[in-house]
Amino acid sequence: MLDFIIGKYNYWFYIILMMVGFYAIIGKRNLVKKIIGLNIFQTAIILFYVSIASKKGATLPILEHHGGHGDHAAIIEVASYMNPLPHVLMLTAIVVMVATLGVALGILIKIYKRYGSVEEDEIACVIKSENMKYEVGK
Amino acid sequence: MTDQAPILVLAIPLLTAILMPLAGLFREKLCYPLVIMIMMVTTALSGAILFQTIHFGPIHYYIGDWRPPWGIELVIDPLNALVLLAISVSALLAAISSKAVVEKELEGKEIYFYTLFLLQMTGLTGMVITGDMFNLYVFLEITSITGYALLAVGEDGSYMAVFKYLVMGTIGASFYLIGVGYLYMATGSLNMADVASLIPGVIHSRIVFFAFILCVAGLFVKMAMFPVHGWLPGAYSKAPSAAAALIAPLTTKVSVYILIRICLSVFTAEYVFDFLKQTDFIVWLASATIVFGSLSALAQKNYKKMLTYILIAEVGYMVGGFFLGNRLGISGAILHIVNDVAMTLALFLGAGIFFWKTGSGEREDLKGLFVKMPLTMTGFALAAFSVIGVPPTCGFFSKWYLISGGIAGGQYLFVAALIFSSLINAVLFFRLFEIAYFQPFADHHHAPAHGAVAIEEAPIHMLAPFLVAGAILIALGLYSGEIVTQIIQFAIPAEIM
Amino acid sequence: MPMETLFSIKPALAVLVSLLAIPGIVLSKKPNVRESWTFIAAIAKLAIIVSMLPFVLKGGEFHYTLIEIWPNLGISFRVDAFGMLFALVASSLWIVTSIYSIGYMRHLDEHSQTRYFTFFAVALSATIGVAFSANLLTMYLFYEALSLATYPLVTHHQDKEARTSGRKYLFYILGGSIALALPAMLITYHFTGTLDFAAHGVMAGKINSGLGLALTLMFLFGFAKVGIMPMHSWLPAAMVAPTPVSALLHAVAVVKVGAFSVVRVLTGIVGTGFLADFGIHFVVAVIASVTIIVASLIALSQDELKRRLAFSTIGQLSYILLGVCLLSEAGMTGGILHIAMHAFGKITLFFCAGAIFCATGIKKISEMTGIGKRMPVTMAAFFIGSLSVVGLPPCGGFISKWQLVIGTMQAGQISMLMVLLTSSMLNAAYFFPVFYKAFFCSDDESLFEDKVDEAPIWCVVPLTLTAGISVILFFFPQPFLNLAQLAVSAILGS
């Protein structure tokens, strides 16, 4: 049981982090905090991928060249190098995350300009009062 | 030339998207013809690809000449060639139709609109033709991000709606990403064909099971299945018409295609249908989606929102049809992907024309349109008949396969949901037609004055693509049998009865 | 007798020729040019159909596949005796109705006449399409096309009443076909693998009795155009349409399409053998009988002439079903023949109703006392029409009724015989007072002066024509009788 928790601590970390992010998205009223929560959520996933790449006692996955292009029979012990693929994938995922963040913040600026607030309930109030004015004025 | 077709169909829109701002700064009027030209090129290439896959078998294109499973490859078999052609034609028609709308609703932002348009196309194309799981995620996000931007600049309230879409969509894509991660952990590969060959070895693994659930859940968010559909009505109904015409027919359908692809070609049909045995639940969920979508559509006064709820119900058709697990059902689901692209395109192009004409999304403002815009209403009637399921339009034939599949699979709840939604669709569309046809009300025998109302149709570049879409609905219907026997049936593994 | 088949494009042409006239109708600037397009199409249609008649009378059939969708199922046409009978009736009456329409619509200066004539053409295309269908899919396609094409005709006046009637129309007709007929068709296809109309049906041996009964009922109520109760309410509601629409569509085309479709399904899909083996024919016959009696009773209570005629139609349609369900030679012949005889009789009656409205603006029977003095020709035609529908000589309706009576005796169904006789008396009860009051009333009761002031000539000519044909059919029931007999021998014989 203990081994189950401690042995797989990386998964626990990423799940807890993901839930924190998820809570922020759902539970927080402030739109900026929601976006931060979204970021935490996505970062947790990045953490997960990176964690599955690591091995005990492994080093960076860079081969030392003695000139030329690695043709000669250098026996590479796979177990002593970290898996580079998830790292590479996560570079892409980080880019995606940043792009999403950019668009989200852009929309947020527009929301702020339009409604004067980034709090969800205040925005709802503004919309409601506008609808009422619209209906009264009709 | 055709050897390079797969990468060209991806690269040409991408490179043009980068060049577009430059072209636009040079002369703004250049953007629209440029986009049309590029869309025609992609359509031609898609046609060539489809021809090639039917006659010569699947195409494998290795990007950068790196062999799989380490390199990323583009795999095109008859199934995705068909979907590719469908999305290319749809985008072409949406592009042609966009001119008037962009001028009216998005003044000064044309360059950026068309740039995002091309990027969106790149993303969609990539999603359809890629053979790598992670690459799929990247293209999925390209599509989604450009989608957020395109949809955000619409009517009042679009910002909040798109914000909701952004949050939900990103969560969905993230679930998919976790799923890919789990799959990688279990099989050690990201290449679709490679994973499929490795799955039988790890079939009992719980990791694979959760990978499946997460991928499917993520895709359910992207395609707006009940209960994670909440983003779609707001985002699509408040969007600018040109963006809606591009995105609505495509994004959800391509997500359904991806679901079918990963179930058949990655997790393998044996795993999904024989091993898991959970498919009944998904068919039930799909039936719930159909009923929910239809009933919600009934409650809408805004015709654009009504169309979005119909869209949700249509997604239920496809997912339910696929998870029936028999040949008829899966054929119906795949056929419906193509048919629904056409139907949704026609509906949203029509809605775009209505919005352009009346400036309002409310149903009540469609008064008298049968007289003022007879051609548009005829086209819209065709689209409506297809959604209701009247032969010989394509919607009837998808329903034919789906209902037959439901009968063959013993899923009578699904069959009942399909029939229920056909009836509700009839009510929905005839409600619109009544307003357009009967109002302004004539009094008893002194009917609308003779010829007093002039015909003011939409401009030709909005009307022509719309009528072409309507004609396509009939053509697809009459060729359904051909499409299924020549193309779709090769996409379904032979083991499925 | 071996069935000779000829592959010819004529069936498809017969269906499509009226569609080809539509651009002419829509784009004509002058009303006379527009109407001439309708006549060209109608005459061409009749000509094509008549050209196929001799071959069919010899026992042959025409086949043509328009579009093949699946290897064994597509949009296909087959012209046999039964289809030919219906097609002849519908296409010949289109010409007559078009003449009548001109008189009616122009006299009342109705709006949107182009739309009216366009959708009339589409509706006739769909009707002939149903008549010449070779399989259930084709028939369903044209059935739906007819429902949609007649909606603008029924709701022509575009007022609130039209909207409500339109809703009722769609609810029963479209709702019935999507909710009942479509699943029934798909279930049948699933179990039998074919939808082609076969001489002895396709269900035998593949479908058990319970499912067969369920499917038969689904088809019966699903094809709501046949007006079986309770799927009948749309018919009286559809009377808000202009009278030529009511006349052709609801006395001849729409309702007859319903009856035709149900009879086709009963004989070609379910099969007389299957019906007899499980007693299903008796169930349908009972349902039809109930409809006949109830409809006739309701007709008695209707004061608006068109509504009375509508309920009369509901009853008469069930005669067709009753005749076929007797499964005896004379019964089936009578039922099928009634399609033709009733058509000519009923259309006369509707034309008269329209002529009365056109000339005087009156719709209610209670206001028609003494109208015979003003419109003697119309009321004389009315008399002949009602004789035909009641089934008395010297009108064609007598022949079909006679065959039905013989049929009940052949089948040994005395209860059905009683139904026929009772309903005939009820028919007489709701028709005869109308023209009795019109002609034989004292001068102070009469609401009209003695002056003869008929409806416009374009209205009067058609109704005398159809009344005349009703009488002629009594003496010369060919080719309808021959066609009916051929159809029955194809179904029952071999």
Image (cartoon, coloured by chain):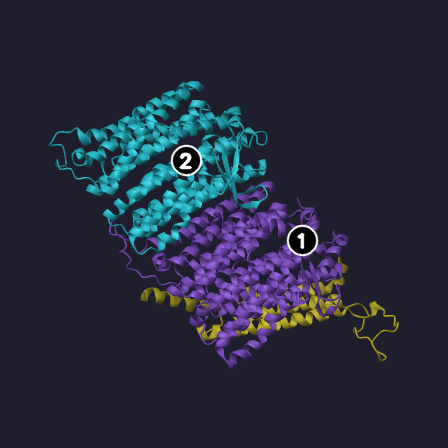
Chain colours: A yellow, B purple, C cyan
Q: Position of residue B340 (x, y in %)?
A: 53, 55
Q: Residues within 10 Å of mark 2 (few under 14, many from 20)?
A: many
Task: Kindly identify which chain the residue marked by label 1 belongs to.
Answer: B
| Horizontal relation, residue C237 to residue B44: left or right | left
Figure check: B427 above or below B58: above
Task: Please tell me in which quadrant of the rendered image residue C245 appears.
Answer: top left
Tell which of C240 and C464 is nearer to you.
Answer: C464
Residue B474 vertical position relative to residue C181 in the rendered view, above or below: below
Amino acid under label 1? Leu
Q: Chain of mark 2?
A: C
Report if residue B70 is visible in the image: yes
Residue tagged 1: B264
Determine which of the numbered discs, if any, sits on residue C86 in the image.
Answer: 2
Query: At numbered mark 2, what does the secondary structure look like: helix, strand or loop?
Result: helix
Where is residue C446, by image quadrant?
A: top left
Residue farthest toward the bottom in the current orientation of the protein = B26
